[in-house]
Image (tube, grey):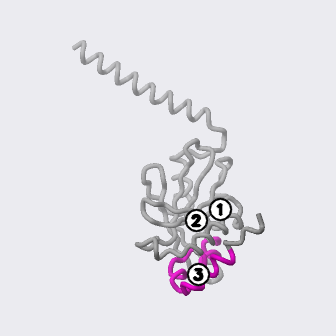
Amino acid sequence: MNRRRAIVKLSSAVLLFGFAASAATAQNMPSGTLTEDSLGQLIASLGLQPKKSESRYDFRFKTTYEGEEWDLTMSSVLSRNGESIWVMAWLDEMPESSTEVPKAALLNLLSRNDEMGNGKFFAYIPSNRRFVLQRVVPNRGVSARAYAGVLKDLGATVRSEYGNWSVANWSRIPRDTRAAMADSKFGDTSRN
């Protein structure tokens, strides 16, 4: 019987410690910030159907840009410290062989990172060999309207940058043209 009471007391202590840790974390977060759970609720409030995968929410975002319908696969996750929200639009899968990836195309994506602004940049996710276009926003005072604006902005950038990230477009560029692009556009170090 004593052993049973000890287990109950230990279980209660662990449970209380867990509640205290959660409360302390919530107290340390500034007012108006999203938690992992409230991020999922916010996404759902927009009529989207988020599916949680570990701490990330995956969802589809359908919209129209310049008269074209786009059905985007997106994800959103809080940064580890909770101070920012990362929103990702999933793009093309990399070709099987790295020799099929023109250097000029990758250099072009990197150069576009500097020009897009507003916290947006291209990245590569090696675990599933996909490119993403990401936007990082501060986790302060994020309303449903503001978050919807972030999704629309990111989607518009996916559309406007299509010619740069579309792997199918890379294969249409003749190999000698790709080499010339790399040499002329990115090989010039005289500007440094």
Does 58 sit above or below residue 69? above
Residue 93 place in picture, x, y as percent? 46, 71
Q: Residue at x 24, y 15 (%)?
A: 3
- Whether tag 1 and tag 2 are in contact, CB under 8 A, the answer is yes
Q: Distance between the residues labelled 1 and 2?
A: 7 Å
User: Circle 2 sits in a helix, a strand or a loop, which is it?
Assistant: strand
In the image as oriented, which residue stretches furthest toward the right? Answer: 191
Quadrant holding the C terminus: bottom right
Does 164 sit above or below residue 86? below
Mark identifier at residue 133: 2
Tell me which amino acid carries mark 2: Leu
**Which residue is tagged 1?**
120
Q: Distance between the residues labelled 3 and 2?
A: 23 Å
Q: Which of marks 1 and 3 is in front?
A: 3
Residue 8 place in picture, x, y as percent? 31, 21
User: Circle 1 sits in a helix, a strand or a loop, which is it?
Assistant: strand
Q: Residues within 10 Å of mark 3 (few under 14, many from 20)?
A: some
Q: Distance between the residues labelled 1 and 3?
A: 25 Å
Quadrant holding the N terminus: top left
Tell me which amino acid carries mark 1: Lys
User: Circle 3 sits in a helix, a strand or a loop, which is it?
Assistant: helix
- The magenta-colored residue range is 156-185
Residue 175 place in picture, x, y as percent? 54, 84
Residue 28 place in picture, x, y as percent? 62, 33
Does 58 sit above or below residue 22? below
Does 102 sit above or below residue 119? below
- Whether tag 3 and tag 2 are in contact, CB under 8 A, the answer is no
Q: Residues within 10 Å of mark 2 (few under 14, many from 20)?
A: many
Mark identifier at residue 178: 3
Q: Residues within 10 Å of mark 1 (few under 14, many from 20)?
A: many
**Earlier along the polypeptide chain: callout 1 or callout 3?**
1
Tell me which amino acid carries mark 3: Arg
